[in-house]
Amino acid sequence: MNFADLGLSDKTIKAIDEFGIKEPTTVQSDVIPSILQGKDVFTIAPSGCGKTTSYVFPLLDIISQNSNEQKYILIITPDSEQSVVVSDRMAIFNKYHEINETTLKGKGEDINKEANVIIGSPDLLLELADDDKLDLGKTNILVVDDINLIKKKKQLANLEKILEILPADKQNIVYTNRRSKETQGILDKILKAPEEIKIDKAKEAEAEISAKSSENQAPKAKAVKTSSRQPVKDKEALDLIKKYNSFNGKTPEFLTYKGIIVNID
């Protein structure tokens, strides 16, 4: 199976191919068609198997292909670090689309009013919503990635408050690295007759093998410092980014620093 079989657009597939990804992982094959069909999706999957890009790829197409009907997507992550990871994935594969995205990295940030995609942790999103700086009421698609990690960050109460603000009529996409009794109540509030996808132990092993084999083709998904020092901006990289504008003003943040390795999930 290839990415075209999953229903992705030529623009998205071109960006995927140029990045060096040749075929979808199991979670991408299972999740992408359901998201494109507008279904609610609940996915239980380990990190490193391509789960972040399993929603990034189809969401880019959904926004681009609905130009007459504006789509607003809210992606809720456990913390600012994960928000930046998701933002970087968006920037990489948004190469041939014209999608505006805003990522919340700390308190007191301004929101791009024209953004189709808002990415942030529950506490930062709730703070802006309470200050009337963020309109969550127009959300068409909600992504929660990952609800179990949000629980570990003690952010479930803030997530529940956000759910009270969001419209009932929307598509809901939820990921978790494992099923948890503590999150079941809130999952019941979010999801409506969801397509449930579980990457079992055999598929986890496949995902690990796939991840290892792709290490020689593409950078890794999670930004990791190569030294204990604070990462430093790479002046040469910044000059090249400015000169060639390869990402149309949406350069992934990890590309602007020295000594950062990335792992694409």
Image (cartoon, rainbow, N blue to C red):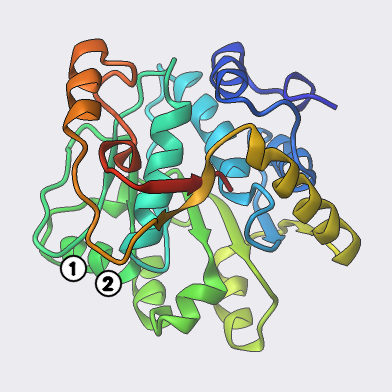
Q: For residue 166, say whether it is visible.
A: no
Q: Quadrant of residue 94?
A: top left
Q: Quadrant of residue 71?
A: top left
Name the amino acid, label 1.
Answer: Glu
Comparing 108 with 161, the one in front is: 108
Q: Mark 2 and mark 1 in contact (Cβ < 8 Å)?
A: yes
Comparing 159 with 257, the one in front is: 257
Left or right of residue 131: residue 164: right
Picture residue at 65% right of the left edge, 47% below the top: 50
Q: CA distance from mark 1 to mark 2?
A: 6 Å
Q: Which residue of the protein is positioned furthest toward the bottom in this rendering?
A: 182
Name the amino acid, label 2.
Answer: Asp
Q: Which residue is mark 1?
A: 127
Q: Position of residue 3 (x, y in %)?
A: 73, 25
Picture residue at 30% right of the left edge, 53% below the top: 136
Q: For residue 112, say whether it is visible.
A: yes
Q: Could you tell me which secondary element the residue under label 1 belongs to? A: helix
Q: Position of residue 213 (x, y in %)?
A: 75, 42
Quarter holding the N terminus is: top right
Q: Which residue is mark 2?
A: 123
Q: Which residue of the protein is positioned furthest toward the front in this rendering?
A: 227
Left or right of residue 120: residue 93: right
Picture residue at 41% right of the left edge, 50% below the top: 85
Left or right of residue 241: residue 13: right
> Where residue 45 is drawn, which disc sits there?
none
Left or right of residue 36: residue 157: left
How many residues crowd mark 1 within 10 Å: few (<14), some (14–19), many (20+)?
Answer: some
Q: Position of residue 143 (x, y in %)?
A: 50, 53
Q: Could you tell me which secondary element the residue under label 2 belongs to? A: helix
